[in-house]
Image (tube, rainbow, N blue to C red):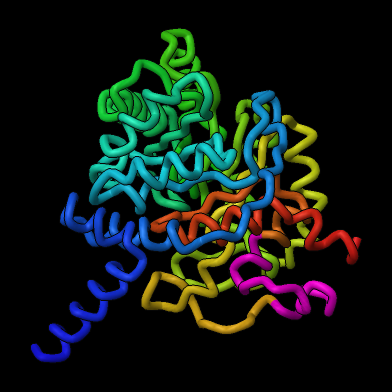
Amino acid sequence: MAQLQTNRRSFIEYLTMVGVGSQVLLQTRNVQAATAAAQESGDSEPWPGMSYRTLGRTGFRASRLVYGCGAALSGQPNDRLLNIAFEAGVNVYDVGYSGYYRNAERNLAGFAKAHRDEIFLISKAPVRVGADDDVDAATAQREAKAWTMLLDKSLSELDTDHVDAYYQMAANNPGVVRAEEMYRAFEDAKAAGKVSYLGISTHENAQECLEAAIETGWYDLAMIAITPAGWYDWNKRQILEGSEDMTHLSPLLQRAKEAGIGLVAMKTGRLLAGRRWGGGANGKVFDRFYDQSVLDQNLTDFQRSYAFVLAHGMDVVNADIQNYGILKENFIAAATADKVFASTA
């Protein structure tokens, strides 16, 4: 207990020293908000200008950093941080249905409504079919109906009548990706004005599902679990066994782009996070993919991994952003990716 009291006293003293943080703590009684305010007040280093890429056939000029709101907003709102990101140039916000992300959609709703005409809003919901299950017409029709109901619930949670894109979340079965019933469900929702673009989000059988999406010509976006070393295996928290590295996956990524699919990277740095945070082994596991000129730059391991995927085929990267420090770290990596790897091109 004495140690806890000492830690708490040191924390309060730190906030008092920076001034702004202590004021926020007294006003809100929210330690997270106070810590963010303290970080902001002590940060005098300017941020680089955000860079942008067109997201496939959507035509939207997207910030190369996508604000991943699912885990970040599952427990409580954080409009302060969302607005910092927005003012800095982040214009794509990704969330997901309440069955997995709890209150994230509801906690994003106020910010999204305030900036609705200026941001690209994405949500998603799963299709309950196993990765290796056979998908017949009846199964596809049942899951399409359930997916449509989850879309309607997402719209309600977000307090809006329209999202820019809705994903088939955790798409791990190529048969579902190819199912005409799923596509018809999207077309019906689009005709009703509920959604404009269709996407998949996948970290299992990602290559097979991306190839299926390319073949159909139906999908506008694909969020894939990819790292400098290749496909990330979410189930085993490691690089997928037998995966080619990202450089050798470039022909597939190029085919997806030629098919009009905007490519969104996710789980890129998860292997660096350690198992405590749902990742794999800590360490500099991607360093073998970087030239010395990249290793010599003042970047974190996470920043190098994000910059690499952006410089080698991905349009944007989705990052879970929990606080001001993580936002700035990810922002710098996304904004400067091409410069980081310019000398290795």
Q: Is residue 33 left or right of residue 28?
A: right
Image location of residue 26, percent across then percent down: 17, 56
Q: In the displayed image of the protein, which residue is found farthest to the left?
A: 1
Q: In the displayed image of the protein, which residue is found farthest to the bottom?
A: 2
Image location of residue 270, percent across then percent down: 51, 67
> Image point 39% across, 57% down: which residue?
322
Q: In this view, does 244 lie to the left or right of 275?
A: right
Image location of residue 57, percent across then percent down: 70, 25
Q: In which quarter of the image is residue 138?
A: top left
* Total labels drawn: 0
> Image point 60% across, 60% down: which residue?
45
* Magenta highlight on residue 127: no
Viewer-side residue, 234 vs 314: 314
Magenta residues?
A: 287-306
> Image point 24% across, 42% down: which residue?
103
Image location of residue 44, percent across then percent down: 55, 59
Q: State the quadrant of the N terminus.
A: bottom left
Viewer-side residue, 109 vs 238: 109
Does any portion of residue 146 appear in the rendered image?
Answer: no
Q: In which quarter of the image is residue 223?
A: top right
Q: State the quadrant of the C terminus.
A: bottom right
Does any portion of residue 124 appear in the rendered image?
Answer: yes
> Image point 36% across, 44% down: which residue?
80
Q: Is residue 1 left or right of residue 246?
A: left
* Magenta highlight on residue 296: yes
Viewer-side residue, 103 vs 57: 103
Helix, strand or loop: magenta stretch: helix
